[in-house]
Image: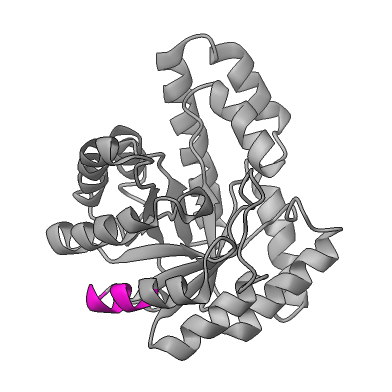
Amino acid sequence: MKIRDMIGQGKPTLSFEVFPPKTEANYESVEKAALEIGKLHPSFMSVTYGAGGGTSKYTVSIADKIQRECGVPTLAHLTCVSSTREHVHKVVEELKEYNIENIMALRGDIPKDGNIQNDYRYASELIREIRESGDFCIGAACYPEGHVESVNKTEDIQHLKEKVEAGCDFITTQMFFDNNTLYNFLYRIREKDIKVPVVAGIMPITNAAQVARSIQMSGCYIPARFKALVDRFGDNPAAMKQAGIAYATDQIIDLIANGVNAIHVYSMNKPDVAAQIQANLSEIL
């Protein structure tokens, strides 16, 4: 089932993201966690591509397994900055073979060694090629606080508009911890006539170390309310986990109450976290 047929219909949806293993030795444990999350029967699940596309061979296999064994539609990530056009087309054909209808088309992070290919410069180029390659539902990323490489938010929204014009069907946000950040972003993109559905990306912070990593990765704003939570519970792992899940749940409830119905949880391959959030929303979804 295509994600564009699920979202934007006025009904809440809850989906989860998992990431493939970095090495083959970890494949079994990651697959087990992904299938446990799949057994929760979310609206869909996304499977990331790995930094530099290094774990791309596992993305398709895990996405296929989730669909076949859990009956949950999957969204396979595909990045292009480190890939040749030949490799991208090979992956697209594999996705067709496994009946995976949804692709998250991303430029991807620049590898630390700076080793990139020259076939693609922007995600919009990848989106356009996927659109020409078959009847896929295509997602793209968006950045409510602006991409770290963009000069300003105006330029960032222009790049987003280019992705939409290239053919993406919906956009998923990077994590954010202040819902007003998203509400302001939605106002700005609608002004620019970007009307595709927006999926809100929520990251449950279940240990204090995640806060520093989140800021480093995305530069996202951490509100005082959340800082107080980390200061109070950060040294108590069990309490921090409970508080982080509660904070994410509160974010989601506020989003749905304000008409943002598509929620995507960055579950970090933690079935217990995914299950608790879903349980907290049992009467809302």
User: Residue at coordinates 24% horizontally, 77% vertically from top-left?
Assistant: 97
Residue 147, quarter of the rendered image: bottom right
Instruction: Give residue 165's position: percent from left, percent from top.
Output: 64, 85
Relative depth, front residue between 190 and 119: 119
Relative depth, front residue between 117 and 239: 117
User: Residue at coordinates 61% horizontally, 78% vertically from top-left?
Assistant: 125
Q: Is residue 195 visible?
A: no
Residue 200, quarter of the rendered image: bottom right
Instruction: Give residue 181's position: percent from left, percent from top.
Output: 71, 50
User: Residue at coordinates 36% horizontally, 46% vertically from top-left?
Assistant: 281
149 w.r.t. 71: above or below = above
Residue 144, quarter of the rendered image: bottom right
User: Residue at coordinates 26% horizontally, 46% vertically from top-left?
Assistant: 34
Quadrant of the snapshot with the N terminus: bottom left
Q: Is residue 96 left or right of residue 223?
A: left
Which span is picked out in magenta? Answer: 92-99
